[in-house]
Image (tube, rainbow, N blue to C red):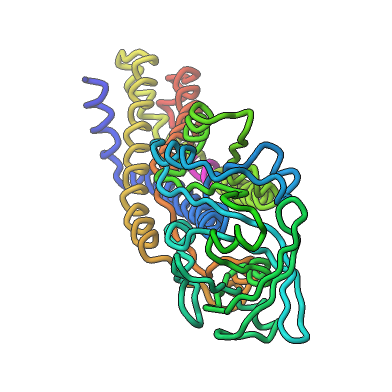
Amino acid sequence: MNYFKLAWRNIWRNKRRTLLTAASIFMAVFLALLVRSIQTGWFDNLVNVVIQSYTGHIQIHKNGYWDDKDINNSMYCNDSLLRVLQSVDNIRNVVPRLEYFALSSFKQQTKGVLLIGTDPVKEDNLTHLSRKIIQGKYLQNTQHGILVAQKLASYLEIKTGDTLVLIGQGFHGVSAVGKFPVQGILHFPSPQLDNQMIYMNLPTAQEFFGADNRITTVSLMLNNPDHINQTVTLIRSVINNDRYEVMRWDEMLVEVMQQLKAKTAGGNIIIAILYMIVGFGIFGTVIMMTNERIKEFGVVVSVGMQKTRLAIIVLVEMIFIGLTGIISGIAVSLPIMLYYKVNPIHLTGNMAKTFINYGIEPLMPLAFKPAFILGNVIIVLIIVSLTCVYPVRKIFKLNVVEALRK
């Protein structure tokens, strides 16, 4: 306890020096947390856009479907499978779908489309599809109508109330032909989705493709996405793995994941450079602090204090100063992160256009996760610990006579 008492008194004998060192550490924590919060918030926002636009966190298919997305690789819509999935912890929504390609035609215009048969209520719970309606109204379970993406509708020159002809090949090669009234127009932020998506009720799609009671995909939304690996393991333990394949969103969207990793790597380089700058700043402050106290060290050693004890006191001083800077950095950054997590920054200008082109709403929410806060605190503590090597080395190499002459 005496070491702690002496160290606490020593750091406040020269308040300016102490506050300067603590300020260097404060800036390290503050800037690192904000940069990491922005980077993680951007990453999570992009992931949520991708997941909530279409895929869900996890999908289940018949084995081999993902490599060959043919309607003949569809699976029987097993009610027992859906009940088992709904009983699994951490699964919030279970949405069966029948997805396949068709040719759409209206007057003189034709275009290939991705046709999705789904349960409108469950789909809305997963992807919030009803919020994307810009004309007309959302589907009901008993209706025969369809929802058409905005850019696709513009290309076909079709509007709500018109009738769209769909032509394709159904299950086991049957002819799939039908006329469907356009009930609503959807807008997707992603240009790719906005150019090709058509939604209809699952029974209507099954009838159109001649695939009675069959589906191609079961999409799952989780309560806690951080536990996705544990949930996948749990799902595989309760279903027939010889019949079904279970895939995470990042396994299905490999290109998106690679882009995210590239962006994250760039952010990590920026943070590493920031830590280097801050580390040298803290080290410079410690050198200044140590050299100012050389005579003081010489005096206390000359009157009988062991160098080991003096080094321990200096280490405790650095711990106190480091904790002061870290706690103040967290205290100032936390309200900022929490505020902009709830109230995302609305981007404008070229930055907003870039986000929209990538299919992302032009918002910049900040993330708040204890994991990256703890990680940054540990890194700063390591930097502070490394800077302690200099004053300790100075103390053990101290020449008392030369120190007293300074």
> Compared to 157, does 142 lie above or below?
above
Tally of marks: 0
Evaluate whether residue 276 shows in this view: no
Q: Nearer the viewer, residue 294 or 33?
A: 33
Q: Quadrant of the C terminus?
A: top left
Is 225 one of the magenta-colored residues?
Answer: no
Q: Nearer the viewer, residue 134 or 204?
A: 204
Q: In which image quadrant can residue 62 be found? A: top right
Give the magenta range: 277-282
Residue at position x 50%, y 50% from top? 36
Evaluate whether residue 119 shows in this view: yes
Which secondary structure class fits the magenta region best? helix
Q: Position of residue 313 (x, y in %)?
A: 33, 23
> Compared to 367, does 289 lie above or below?
above
Residue at position x 50%, y 28% from top? 390
**Residue 406 as seen in the image, left or right of residue 68:** left
> Compared to 383, does 107 lie above or below?
below
Residue at position x 45%, y 39% from top? 85
Q: Nearer the viewer, residue 123 or 228?
A: 123
Q: Position of residue 369 (x, y in %)?
A: 41, 45
> Compared to 83, does 342 lie above or below?
below
Q: Position of residue 364 (x, y in %)?
A: 49, 64
Q: Position of residue 13 (x, y in %)?
A: 26, 39
Is 280 one of the magenta-colored residues?
Answer: yes
Residue at position x 52%, y 78% from top? 183
